Each structure stands twice: as C-alpha cells, then as structure tokens.
C-alpha cells in the first residue's frame, strides 16, 4: 500500500489520471453543484460535465479501429470525453520534449478527427514531471513547442499531469520556488495562458488522492497552494480517498472541493486492473452516489487494460451519469429488490422554482449491470477476428514536424530532423525492478464497451498483439514503476508499498495477457512512439486465422452464450473490493465443506448420518456450481466473436483451472481426509480461513494490490498448498481452446486404464517393446500397483472425453507403506512372477521381475523426516496442455498436506530424461546423494 508520508525515490511511471473536460457540442450539460459546505455553485444554470474514458497504459496500445469503436460507443451511450495518454507513446512522458514525426502526426490528426466526428472531446495529456526543471525557460519553451505542435493537429483541449513523481525539487528550482506546488502551479498557469486559456484544461496534482495528502486533505499545504494559486478555469483531477477508491462520498468531495476552490474531475480507478495480473473487473459502476454529479466537474474511468472487457465498466458509468444528469439534489437510490424498475419517472421541483426538472432514471448497480450485460450479449454472436501483427520497431531517428513551420491543421513540407532516443533511459535513482521481461508492467487501458451495433470493421491488427520488452532493454517508464508486480503467479507476498495511483499497471505479460501474446515474444523493444497504419502494413503477419484442411476439425464450433453465462462471468470478476454474489456463495460453501470435513473423515466412519448427508448434499451443490463455471468457460471459448474472447481468455482460463482443482479436492475430502491434529490445525489456522486482513481488504481499508489474486487467489489461499505458486501459474495455451480435462479421485475400476498408461509411457520411444503379452501387467505391477492397492486414498485420475489419460498417486508416509508392501504386496508379486535365473543376461522384463525377489534398499531416516511422502505422476503423451500436470500435482500435494505431510519425493530412472524434465517442471528438485540412496535412480523432492 502506498504511504503518503513516503516520498518516491524515483519517478514512477504514469498510469495517470487525466480526465478531460468536454468541449463545445461534445459536452453534456448538467447544473452546477448545489451550494453546500461553503462551496458556491449555481443552482439553476447549466455547466459542462466531463464524462468518458482514459487510455493511459503500458504495453500494447489500442488500435485505431478500437479507438473509433470506443468513440462510437461513447456517443451512443452519452459520454463525451476521451483522454489520450498511452504510455507506449514515449513522447507523452519519458521523451516529452520530442516532437512527433510526420507519420505520428498523421495518426494523431486522424484520431482527433474521428473523435470530433462522433462528438467526443479529445484531450491530449503530457506528463513532464519526471525530469523537468520548472525554473528553466528552455524547458518551458520545449513544453510550449510540443503543445503547439499538437494544437496544430486540431487538438483544443489539454492536460498537464504531475502524478507519480518525486516531491523533491532540484537545487535550481528551490532557488526560485518556495514549494513544489508553487513550481507546478506556475508552469501550469503559464502554459494555460500561452495556449489561449482553452475551454478544457486539466491539471493532475502529485497529491491526487486522500492517502497521498500530507498530513491529510484539509491540512495539506500542497493542496492549499493549488487551490489558491491555480487559475480558477483549470480543472483538477482527483481519484478519491485512495488510488482505487471503494467509495467516494459526498462529504469527501465537498472537503476537497473546499480546499481546491473548485469541483474536481474524478479520475476513477474502480475498474483499473493494471496492478494484478489475475484480476479483471466486469462489475457495475458503484460506490459513488449520484448526489456526487452536481458536485463534480466530471468523471473519467480508467478501466481494464483489455479493450474488449470494458463494455460493462463504460456502459454502467454512462447509466450512472444519466440517472442524475440534471443534478437532482438528493440521490434516490433504486434498490435491487423485486419492486425495482429500470425506469421510474420522478418529478422533483427545483429549489425556489415551480419549474419541473426533466425525468431522471434512478440508478441501481445491479440493474445497470443487467442492462449492460444484455446489450453486451449481442456482441458475442457477431463473428469477428483480428489478425495478429507485431508492433513495428522504430529506428533511432525520426522525422519531426516543426510546429513553427506548420499551418494548422495541415502539415507543411518543411521538416526538421532530430535524434529521438527510442531506447528507454534508466533513471539513476530507480531500483532495477523491471529487468525481467516477464515483469514488464502493462498499464491499463480503458476498454470500450461493445455496443449492439453489430457492425465492426475488420482491422489489420490483432487484439492479442503485444509488445514484450527484451531483457536487456527495459522500458523507461516500466523502470520507474514502483507498482511493478512480481512474476510469481498469484500471490506476491510483498505488498506494493511504492505503488502509485494512476499507474495501476499489469506486469507479467505472458501470464496475464491474451493467450496468443506469447507469439509476440520476439518483438523488439524499439517501440515506435506511435503505431502508424503504414508501419503496420509493412510488418509480416505472425499469426493467421486457422483454416482447417479437408481432414482437419475446426478449432471451435460457435456456441451461443446465455445471459446467465455473462452474469456468472461478471460475478467471478466483479470489483476490486467485492466479489459477485455467486462467487461469494462458492467461497462460503468451500469454506464450510473444508471446515466440516471431519464428519466424512476416515476416522469418523460416517457415524453421524445426518451430518454426513448434509455435507455430501452441500458438496454436490458446490460441485454443480463448479461445473457451471467450467461450462461457462467452454461456451465462451466457442464464442463466434474471437476478438472479445482473446481479451477474456487468460482470465477465464485461470478461474477455470483453480475451480477445477478445488472441485477435485472437495471430491477427495469425502472419506479420505484424516481427523488428525494437523487436520484440526489446517481447519482452524488463520492461513486457511478468511483472515482479519482479508476482512479489512473487503472493507476498503487497504488498496486492492495489497491483497492479490482476486477470486482465484481466494480459492488458492483456501487450499492446503496455497504457497505453491508455481503450480497455480498456468499460462493459457497459445490458441484458445475449449477442451476440458477433469480430475477426480481414483476408484478401483480405474486400475486397468492406469496400468495401460503406465506401460505406454514407460515404453515410449523404445523401438522394440521388451515385454511380451504374458507380461502385460508387469510394468504396472512394478511402478504403480503397490500404490493403487495399498494407498488408494491418495490417487487421482485425469480424464478427457475419450477416458483416462493421466494419474497422480502417492502415500502420505512411505515407512508404513513399505512395511505393508513387504507383507501384502511383494509376496503376491513373487508368486505371480518367478525369480529369473541370475546367471544369464537378463532382459528388461526379467530385471523387473527380479526386483520383486530382492530386498529393496530403504531410504535414510534423515531424508524421510523431511520428505515422508512418495508420489508418482504421469500424463499420456497425447495430452499437450502442460497445465493439467500442474493441476494433478496440486490435487495430490493438497491431499498429502491436508493429512499431515510436509514433503514429498519421487524416484526416477537415471536414463529417463522425460520424467526428470517432467518432475522438474512440477517443482521437484534433485536431492543430493546421501548414504543409503539407491544407485540406479535419482531421488527428486518437493517441500510442502
């Protein structure tokens, strides 16, 4: 969690908020805030209200077609503003002094023209705060020259952003300005006046939320200076009490408005997901009373990075705004009960006037969500597919337009050439956080909500296209991002204390982004400041739409989604501080089943019939809920609109994987859990139950990045092996697939199938199988027979639509298991297989038979005290999905740890490279040779 008292030691990347006021006809009008708490606002006059979206993230920027689609949707839904601040445009922040090239200028002009065409106010934001010297007139002139150039493109609205930067001024500035706030205000006022006092001009303060104000909002010298010295026509951005605010109250807005001496523009991070690669937010806009509308200058949403997943975020924001766009004094909150209606006509009279206000639609988050999902549902049936292309690389030099030689809005042939350093420059004060390519932060991008105007034009760009930085060429802003996320799968133990507000960036590319983004990993790090159409056309295609041949099956068969499917999806990926009702119900049920599993434990012998029946009934219902999630995944994976799927797929893949594992674990609990002292610890320990910190998180006491993983993280924390992050890190396949594998506990009827897989995988790669038909069971008897016969409670099988294709077996304590084998299994095998003649050369089969007649060496006690459990896992070669092996291992280790184990080991033949590699990828490591270890095998272990 970011601490306000902590000054940043290095400039941070900007995921900055920059709302933009709407211009001219693009602006919706709303009455000024009601006069209250000493803040005077006209009661009857109308004013412009900024409402819209911000594009300000790291990584793959939105395509031109996506931006145009955003403008169409905003126009349709009544939103009026778009803030341009993509972090891959280095000339917005890191290289803010550099002018745009001719090609880049044409792109910006096209974009500005498209926004005007749809009545959307285009605001250009620039963020010079990382390294500007406020007292240096050359620096001020460079800023003016840059904004002059953009104004020649047709842009009339601007924003200066000073978020996520060091509070300390350089020595030169300290001689001129009395405080950091004075320096920022001075340059902002000067630029505003230089540009002719544009109607829309935004300022983002360094203290842009309550927790960043020192010592607090009402006593902050910084905010007081901004309020007193900033010209009154300049609007100020504010994120609320926190960077990601659960609630923004009327009282908090009135408090900050009084200090700022103006109504703020809210840069809302409620749907921002950059700070956690496992989270997506598809819930409704909520936690902001519509009473805020007359007290604000505007609201801009900074939504999910994934463009196609922002339909709900933007749609519900529009519904919220329209519910009180007339500035009704008191908020009439529509309940979520049966008596609620989407549209209720209310007639309220203006204070001191008999004139009736226009009809208002009251706002209910749940009803707004239903409206958005109903409209979004139509988009899924529209066949749509982008082609994936790499982002073009740019050279060291670019042609730059000199604003002084341009006649607006056309470009002049006169140009100057300057050197543009496209490679990021590491700030010396920055800790080397982002040197790992997988840690590259991907900032968020507002995603447009899909409208039911089913006409989407095909684009040359693939939505899953992504830029992956080279290891030795870290991105500039990424370097400065304290919010940098650990590459580890779900739970980064370290809370992001240095995280900055508007930055919310998503870090791990391969983990969190669209499945096909891994194809782009060879992209260079020379990212062009802007992608131009001409550049994109010149880049070779790296991913084509799959077209099946005559004898090939299609990758998917389009399957219709239901509104219930989308509703479930939204509830699984709801809001930063809140899970949807169905998700909450699943968590509660799993918690209850786990906490009460003693009634179905091995020790209880099912004595309490009523309690056993209740447990099994609730377990069955829980499994049905899990199945509904898996079915939703399947239908979404088969949706006709692949563009939407690509943005959603990594998230639905992740939740499907963890839900499948949890479902298998619940099935295992029934009749297999031991009622031991460790088991009681497992149930009662705060690590396994919702802890106090979790409750604080849901109350909004902490920023959401302090509690990572979303719903998937919650379920992971409820499993015994919650710390085994490597097993929960299951990147989606390179091509979306709806194929489902299921894991369930082993039953005696599964033995022949497991024997068959065991034999096939043992003999894989052998030219001549050294076993006759009479010895068909020999391999199974030797490798898995004892575990299946004497330790069936720790067995799991993997199934697909053709049957069993994998297994995971084990025993909690190998010492009593070995004793059982000597008494009950080995004699049976000695009778089944005669001892071969040792004086002749033995075949592979005979050597295996001989092993039943020889005393097996026991492992040393010092080793078994740390690794008491024996495991054996294998997957058939036809299974190409690497994630299922991790899920199998996760289920097996969960069962072992739940029954008291703290370490497991496996035995692998020295010559079996396949299994050595297989177990290594499942987190097992080769244990150093100890006295007593067998000579012909390698022992691999894993702590639990």
Image (cartoon, rainbow, N blue to C red):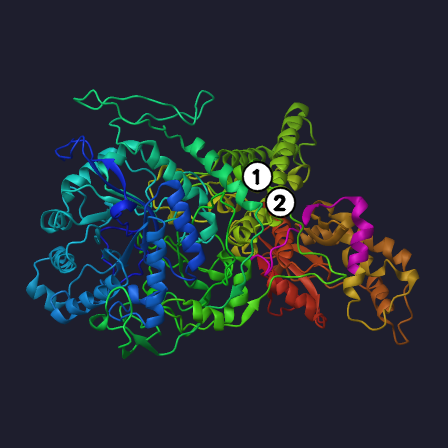
In what element is the residue under mark 1?
helix
Could you say which disc has been placed on residue 635 in the image?
A: 2
Disc 1 and disc 2 in contact, CB within 8 angstroms:
yes
Q: Which residue is mark 1?
A: 565
Query: CA–CA distance between discs 1 and 2?
Result: 8 Å
Asked whether 861 or 621 is in front, the reply is 621
Q: Decide if residue 264 is on the left or right side of residue 632.
A: left
Q: Decide if residue 214 is on the left or right side of residue 707.
A: left
Q: Decide if residue 812 is on the left or right side of residue 99.
A: right
Q: Can the viewer see residue 576?
A: no
Image quarter of residue 163: bottom left
Q: Within 10 Å of the Cα at label 2, are there few (<14), some (14-19), or many (20+) other Cα atoms?
A: some
Residue sitting at x 81%, y 57%: 756
Q: Can the viewer see residue 482?
A: yes
Asked whether 404 or 375 is in front, the reply is 404
Asked whether 655 or 384 is in front, the reply is 384
Say how many tags the image has. 2
Residue 746 among magenta residues: yes
Residue 5 picture location, percent across and down:
22, 52
Residue 847 picture location, percent across and down:
84, 68
């Amino acid at each position: 969690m970011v601490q306000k008292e902590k000054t940043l030691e290095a400039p941070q990347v900007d995921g900055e908020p920059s709302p933009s006021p709407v211009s001219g006809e693009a602006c919706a009008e709303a009455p000024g805030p009601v006069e209250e708490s000493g803040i005077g606002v006209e009661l009857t006059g109308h004013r412009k209200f900024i409402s819209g979206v911000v594009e300000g993230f790291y990584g793959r920027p939105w395509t031109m077609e996506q931006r145009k689609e955003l403008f169409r949707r905003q126009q349709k839904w009544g939103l009026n503003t778009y803030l341009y601040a993509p972090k891959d445009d280095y000339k917005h922040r890191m290289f803010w002094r550099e002018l745009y090239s001719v090609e880049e200028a044409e792109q910006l002009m096209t974009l500005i023209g498209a926004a005007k065409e749809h009545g959307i106010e285009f605001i250009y934001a620039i963020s010079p705060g990382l390294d500007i010297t406020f007292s240096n007139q050359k620096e001020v002139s460079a800023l003016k020259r840059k904004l002059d150039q953009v104004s020649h493109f047709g842009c009339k609205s601007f924003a200066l952003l000073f978020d996520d930067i060091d509070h300390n001024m350089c020595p030169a500035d300290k001689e001129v300005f009395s405080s950091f706030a004075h320096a920022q205000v001075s340059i902002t006022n000067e630029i505003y006046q230089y540009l002719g006092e544009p109607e829309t001009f935004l300022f983002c303060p360094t203290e842009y939320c309550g927790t960043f104000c020192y010592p607090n909002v009402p006593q902050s010298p910084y905010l007081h200076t901004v309020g007193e010295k900033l010209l009154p026509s300049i609007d100020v951005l504010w994120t609320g009490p926190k960077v990601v605010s659960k609630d923004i109250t009327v009282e908090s807005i009135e408090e900050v408005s009084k200090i700022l001496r103006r109504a703020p523009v809210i840069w809302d991070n409620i749907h921002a997901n950059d700070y956690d690669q496992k989270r997506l937010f598809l819930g409704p806009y909520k936690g902001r009373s519509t009473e805020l509308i007359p007290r604000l200058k505007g609201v801009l949403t900074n939504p999910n990075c994934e463009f196609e997943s922002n339909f709900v975020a933007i749609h519900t924001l529009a519904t919220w705004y329209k519910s009180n766009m007339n500035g009704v004094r008191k908020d009439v909150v529509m309940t979520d009960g049966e008596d609620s209606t989407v549209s209720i006509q209310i007639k309220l009279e203006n204070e001191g006037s008999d004139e009736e206000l226009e009809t208002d639609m009251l706002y209910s988050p749940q009803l707004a969500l239903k409206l958005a999902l109903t409209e979004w549902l139509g988009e899924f049936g529209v066949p749509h597919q982008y082609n994936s292309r790499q982002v073009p690389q740019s050279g060291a030099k670019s042609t730059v337009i000199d604003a002084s030689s341009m006649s607006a809005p056309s470009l002049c042939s006169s140009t100057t050439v300057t050197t543009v350093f496209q490679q990021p420059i590491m700030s010396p004060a920055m800790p080397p956080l982002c040197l790992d390519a997988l840690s590259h932060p991907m900032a968020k991008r507002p995603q447009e909500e899909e409208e039911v105007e089913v006409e989407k034009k095909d684009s040359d760009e693939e939505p899953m296209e992504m830029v992956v930085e080279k290891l030795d060429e870290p991105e500039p802003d990424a370097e400065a991002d304290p919010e940098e996320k650990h590459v580890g799968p779900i739970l980064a133990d370290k809370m992001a204390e240095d995280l900055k507000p508007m930055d919310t960036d998503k870090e791990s590319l391969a983990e969190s982004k669209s499945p096909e983004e891994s194809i782009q990993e060879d992209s260079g790090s020379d990212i062009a400041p802007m992608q131009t159409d001409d550049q994109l056309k010149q880049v070779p295609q790296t991913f084509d739409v799959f077209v099946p041949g005559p004898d090939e099956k299609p990758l998917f068969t389009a399957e219709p989604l239901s509104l219930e499917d989308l509703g479930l999806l939204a509830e699984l990926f709801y809001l930063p501080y809140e899970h949807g009702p169905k998700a909450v119900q699943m968590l509660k049920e799993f918690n209850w089943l786990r906490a009460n599993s003693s009634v179905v434990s091995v020790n209880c012998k099912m004595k309490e019939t009523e309690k056993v029946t209740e447990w099994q009934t609730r377990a069955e219902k829980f499994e049905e809920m899990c199945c509904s999630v898996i079915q939703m995944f399947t239908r979404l994976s088969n949706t006709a609109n692949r563009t939407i799927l690509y943005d959603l797929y990594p998230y639905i893949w992740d939740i499907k994987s963890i839900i499948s594992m949890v479902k298998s674990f619940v099935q295992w609990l029934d009749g297999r859990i031991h009622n031991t002292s460790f088991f009681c610890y497992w149930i009662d320990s705060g690590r396994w139950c919702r802890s106090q910190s979790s409750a604080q998180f849901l109350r909004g006491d902490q920023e959401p990045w302090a509690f990572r993983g979303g719903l998937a993280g919650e379920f992971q924390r409820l499993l015994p092996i919650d710390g085994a992050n490597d097993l929960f890190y299951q990147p989606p396949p390179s091509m979306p697939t709806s194929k489902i594998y299921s894991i369930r506990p082993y039953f005696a009827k599964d033995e022949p199938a497991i024997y068959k897989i065991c034999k096939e995988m043992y003999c894989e790669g052998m030219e001549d199988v050294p076993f006759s038909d009479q010895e068909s069971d020999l391999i199974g008897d030797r490798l898995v027979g004892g575990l299946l016969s004497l330790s069936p409670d720790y067995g799991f099988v993997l199934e697909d639509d053709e049957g069993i294709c994998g297994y995971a077996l084990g025993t909690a304590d190998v010492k009593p298991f070995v004793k059982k084998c000597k008494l009950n299994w080995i004699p049976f095998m000695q009778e089944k297989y005669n001892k071969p003649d040792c004086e002749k050369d033995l075949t592979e089969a005979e050597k295996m038979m001989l092993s039943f007649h020889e005393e097996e060496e026991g492992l040393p006690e010092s080793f078994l005290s740390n690794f008491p459990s024996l495991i054996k896992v294998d997957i058939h070669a036809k299974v190409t999905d690497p994630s299922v092996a991790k899920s199998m291992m996760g289920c097996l280790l969960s069962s072992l740890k739940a029954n008291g184990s703290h370490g497991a080991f496996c035995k692998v033949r020295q010559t079996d490279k396949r299994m050595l590699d297989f177990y290594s990828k499942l987190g097992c490591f080769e244990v150093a040779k100890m006295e007593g270890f067998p000579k012909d095998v390698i022992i691999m272990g894993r702590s639990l």
